[in-house]
Amino acid sequence: VTILGCGYGYMSLILALADKTKSIVGIDFDSEKISIACNLNSAPERLQFVCSNMTSFEYSMSDAFILGDVLHYLSATEQEAFLLKIIECCNEGARILIRESDKDLLKYRHDKSVSTEVISTAIGFNKYDFEKMSFVSGKTLKTFFESNGFTFEKVVESKKNSNTLFMAVKEQK
């Protein structure tokens, strides 16, 4: 399992403790967050954290990728190139979970999600230039994954903002 945007590593640790059969790699470009993640108590040996830019990281084949609010840090062109890189590393039946703000949803809901990003970057929690963010379209993701041999569905959609969990599953041959 590969977790992109793992931050402080809490979700990675929970997954590692819940499923003792999987190796888990948490990746984040924020060295301060990775430093904290590397010092989590109770972390099993099959859980590792890496400080890296997700677009330049060399991925191993994986049964699952979890992208936690990371795609909007890439331009639309970079998003597609990155997703193509990820799907090349998916085993048959692999799942890709994507949590993102879906810009296709009602404007007032999406504006709430955007406001959260403005605040998070302004206070330094997320280290990125807000002006460069490119929020995704759920419809575009659906078209992309289905044209690349994946099924695609919206799993959960927030009622208060545009935060949405999508799942793509690589079809088995």
Image (cartoon, rainbow, N blue to C red):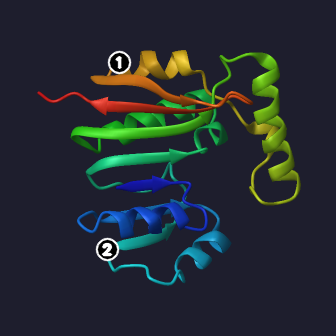
Image quadrant where one finds the C terminus: top left
On the image, numbered disc 1 is attached to which residue? 146
Above-or-below relation of 64 to 20:
above
Of marks 2 and 1, the one in the foreground: 2
Count of labels shown?
2
* Left or right, 21 with reference to 45: left
| Mark sitting on residue 46 | 2
| Residue shown at 58% from the left, 72% from the top | 34
Label 2 vs 1, first from the N-terminus: 2
* Left or right, 68 with reference to 24: right
Q: Residues within 10 Å of mark 2 (few under 14, many from 20)?
A: few
Give how far across and how far down residue 54 sits, in percent: 51, 52
Give how far across and how far down residue 142 sits, in percent: 45, 19
- Say which element carries label 1: helix
Q: Quadrant of residue 46?
A: bottom left
Question: Disc 2 and disc 1: Cα gap in Å?
Answer: 32 Å
Give how far across and how far down residue 121 sits, in percent: 81, 51
Above-or-below relation of 143 to 127:
above
Above-or-below relation of 147 to 66:
above
Give how far across and how far down residue 164 sits, in percent: 59, 32
Which is nearer the eye, 18 or 47?
18
Q: Amino acid at mark 1?
A: Glu
Q: Residues within 10 Å of mark 1 (few under 14, many from 20)?
A: some
Q: Amino acid at mark 2?
A: Arg
Whether label 2 touches label 1, CB < 8 Å:
no
